[in-house]
Image (tube, grey):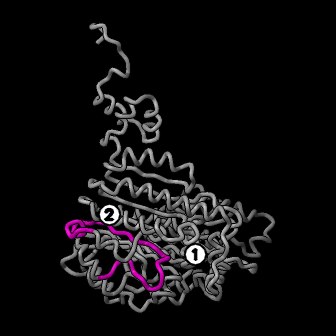
Amino acid sequence: MSVCGETVGAGSLPSELVVHIFSFLAGPDRLRASAACSHWRECLFYPALWPRLRLSLRVSPAERPRLEFLMRKCGWFVRELRVQFAADNYPSGGVGAAAVAGEGAAAAGDGEAPPLCPRWLDLLRTYLELVLCVLSSVRNNRNLQKLSLFGDISILQQHGSISNTYLGKVDPDGKKIKQIQQLFEEILGNSRQLKWLSCGFMLQIVTPTSLSSLSNPIANTMEHLSLLDNHIPGNTTLITAVELERFVNLRSLALDFCDFTAEMARVLADSNHVPLHRLSLLVHSVSIMHKSLDSMPEDENWKALTRNSTNLRVYIMAFDVKSDDMLRILKPSIPLERIHFDSYITCVSGAVVDLISRQYDKFLTHFILMNDVIDMSGFPDLSDNRNEDPLVLLAWRCTRLSLLAVHGYTVWAHNLIAIARLRGSDLKVLEVTEESIDFDQGELADQDVDPVHNLIEQVSLGLGRPWHAVMDIELLSVFTEPTRHFYREMQSFSEGI
């Protein structure tokens, strides 16, 4: 080109070459480069450069123009779309998780919803607009293979179906909600390659009739299905055992525990169904209250399921579930690999932890114990009236344990040292908050030894690496954002087949 006397520059490069060069850029850099000129912008939104799109959106009006631009460019061809709607900064004066779980629940029980500040209503209004933007842009995308939607704003109903009252204020006639539900069904109806469908805590986006929009060929080839929505009114379920019969190729499934019935277990155990590898179950006190546990799988159902699915592993998250209910739920034949307890009102008992360590010693790898109950008398002690601490027994019996996280329960320093010594370097993650650790009077009375320094030293020696207690709980999402943590872990758990 130089010999011929033509102008040489980046704008003279063929589009195919520009696309190839830009394929080495990360997503954010591609977006910045698209602002250089119209030629670059045209090349940068070539479909091959955007096979997957993963967005974490703040529920803020400022996100809308950027989202509309990106979805207008990519929505019609993207093959994998993952969107998290995250209300990062909850307004003061609104209803936080603990408030909803406590005072909010009482108010809802009296038929009156706790008042919301105007900024909360603005958040809900913006949330609906962003959801509409995303769904409308992919409604005609026939290449979509993975669709994952997570709505962190569901913190508004941590403890009950109170969203209708608030949605009624921002969407009085329900038009936006109906439009969102119709768009979601259109996406399912138009899909030709969908293999992965995941929807969690999305404020009524999924209805009991949504899955009927999927054609039989698509349902027959679906590999992952996740429907998690703890505010569906009454005893409504998002999928029935009859509907599940169409999904013969499922490798992984995530549902509300009360929706996972004995009949569903029988469907999955049928020889016509491919072996199930991952099952994630959300146990919520609100669901138990409305739907009960009468239809849950019995031990013989779990035995039949594991005979057909020998590599099945189960992940359970329990929100504010009473210990008596957990003792009913935890059947001996569940191949439980991960369990996460999160409490705002009720605490886990030592009997539950002891049962887990005895029944699932061959499978358990992850154990998370979280308690946000405000009790001025101190944190509950699982070792009360017991010869051995249940957490120490858990570490001793469960030889595959690789993650242990505790907040809001008393962990005695000598027991923490024992846990580290028992599991050693195999315990890849040991997260215990500073305020959860307590010391015996004898340790505190010894003037020659600093108990905190000694604890850090002994645990570090046991683990074979430097260790410190968690000083700031806000730094760990497993403690501060349990719903988002569960959804993110469920996704990786389901993908790790």
Q: Residue at x 46, y 78 (%)?
A: 232
Q: Is 2 positioned to the left or the right of 492 in the image?
A: left
Element class at badge 1? helix
Instruction: State the residue lying farthest toward the front.
Output: 173
Q: Amino acid at mark 1?
A: Thr
Residue at label 1?
165
| Whole-percent x, y for residue 142 in the image | 26, 55
Q: Residue at x 64, y 82 (%)?
A: 112
| Whole-percent x, y for residue 331 in the image | 41, 86
Q: Which mark is residue 186?
A: 2
- How far apart in space, not on screen, are marks 2 and 1 (Cα)? 27 Å
Between 183 and 481, the residue placed more toward the observer is: 183
Quadrant hosting residue 264: bottom left
Element class at badge 2? helix
| Whole-percent x, y for residue 39 in the image | 37, 29
Specify whether residue 227 is painted magenta.
yes
Between 99 and 280, the residue placed more toward the observer is: 99
Image quadrant where one finds the C terminus: bottom left
Specify whether residue 40 is painted magenta.
no
